[in-house]
Image (cartoon, rainbow, N blue to C red):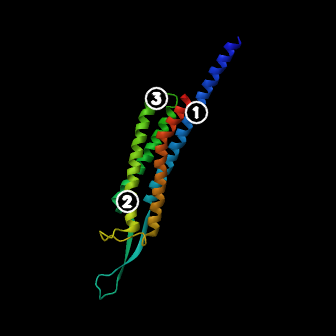
């Protein structure tokens, strides 16, 4: 009798431990998806709201005084930033859909999990490519390019560059959240089986 009751207690303990770890995996998944949603949303909103006008002196003729011209910097003037906004908006929309699907299919089969993981990987690639494009154009704005005679612009449009940097950092956090969605749940499940 003692042997029978002990083995059934062990089975119950292993089952409850498995459910606890599965709950941990599910909670981790939801938190990361929510974090990815918030970060990509903030990145897109911050960059879309990014606009600055500055007065730039342009000297047309050496004998005449410089002409002061108002110049505006906006995100949609640079194709790299347009791609960056598109990547973050797409990832934000996907994070919303995947969050709803994850909540709706918590108890169902692994088929949806696999499909969501494939799209998570696509979002990682999309976000990191958008971040790379925006960082490249940001470095040109910050440092210029003497070989092509492109001047620095961040010394003129400081607020614009700072806001772009905040958006880039936030997007990198969102990218990392999507990357962790690919790495952490499988590791937690692997720990559960060992």
Nearest to viewer (mark 2 / mark 1): 2
- Look at the picture and state if 184 lies above or below 134: above
Measure how far apart labels 3 and 1 are at the Cα level: 15 Å
Choose the circle earlier in sequence order: 2 or 1: 1
- Look at the picture and state if 146 lies above or below 124: below
The answer to whether one can see residue 183 in this image is yes
* Tag 2 near tag 1, CB within 8 Å: no
Report crowding for label 3: few under 14, some 14 to 19, many 20 or more residues within 10 A (C-alpha).
few
The tag on residue 23 is 1
Horizontal side, residue 42 vs residue 130: left or right:
right
Residue at 37% across / 72% down in the picture? Answer: 71
Residue at 46% across / 29% down in the picture? Answer: 110
Q: Which quadrant is the C terminus positioned in?
A: top right
Measure how far apart labels 3 and 2 are at the Cα level: 39 Å
* Tag 3 near tag 1, CB within 8 Å: no
Using the rendered view, name the quadrant where residue 70 is placed. bottom left
Choose the circle earlier in sequence order: 3 or 2: 3
Residue that lies at the very extreme toward the top in this rendered image: 1
User: Which residue matches tag 2?
Assistant: 136
Report crowding for label 1: few under 14, some 14 to 19, many 20 or more residues within 10 A (C-alpha).
few
Image location of residue 138, percent across then percent down? 40, 62
- Look at the picture and state if 184 lies above or below 108: below
Using the rendered view, name the quadrant where residue 11 is placed. top right
Image location of residue 24, percent across then percent down? 58, 35
Q: Which quadrant is the N terminus positioned in?
A: top right
The answer to whether one can see residue 85 in this image is no
Residue at 56% across / 38% down in the picture? Answer: 27
User: Which residue matches tag 3?
Assistant: 110
Nearest to viewer (mark 3 / mark 2): 2
Q: Which structural element holds mark 3?
A: helix
């Amino acid at each position: 009798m003692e042997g029978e009751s002990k083995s059934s207690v062990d089975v119950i303990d292993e089952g409850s431990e498995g459910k606890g770890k599965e709950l941990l995996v599910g909670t981790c998944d939801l938190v990361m998806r929510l974090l990815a949603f918030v970060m990509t949303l903030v990145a897109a909103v911050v960059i879309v709201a990014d606009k600055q006008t500055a007065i730039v002196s342009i000297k047309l003729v050496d004998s005449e005084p410089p002409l002061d011209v108002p110049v505006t910097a906006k995100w949609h003037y640079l194709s790299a930033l347009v791609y960056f906004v598109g990547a973050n908006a797409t990832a934000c929309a996907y994070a919303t859909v995947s969050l709803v699907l994850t909540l709706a299919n918590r108890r169902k089969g692994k088929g949806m999990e696999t499909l969501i993981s494939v799209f998570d990987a696509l979002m990682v690639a999309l976000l990191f490519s958008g971040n790379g494009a925006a960082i490249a154009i940001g470095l040109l704005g910050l440092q210029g390019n003497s070989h092509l005679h492109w001047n620095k612009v961040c010394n003129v449009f400081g607020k614009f560059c700072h806001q772009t940097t905040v958006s880039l950092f936030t997007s990198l956090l969102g990218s990392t959240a999507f990357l962790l969605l690919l790495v952490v749940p499988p590791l937690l499940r692997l720990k559960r089986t060992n």
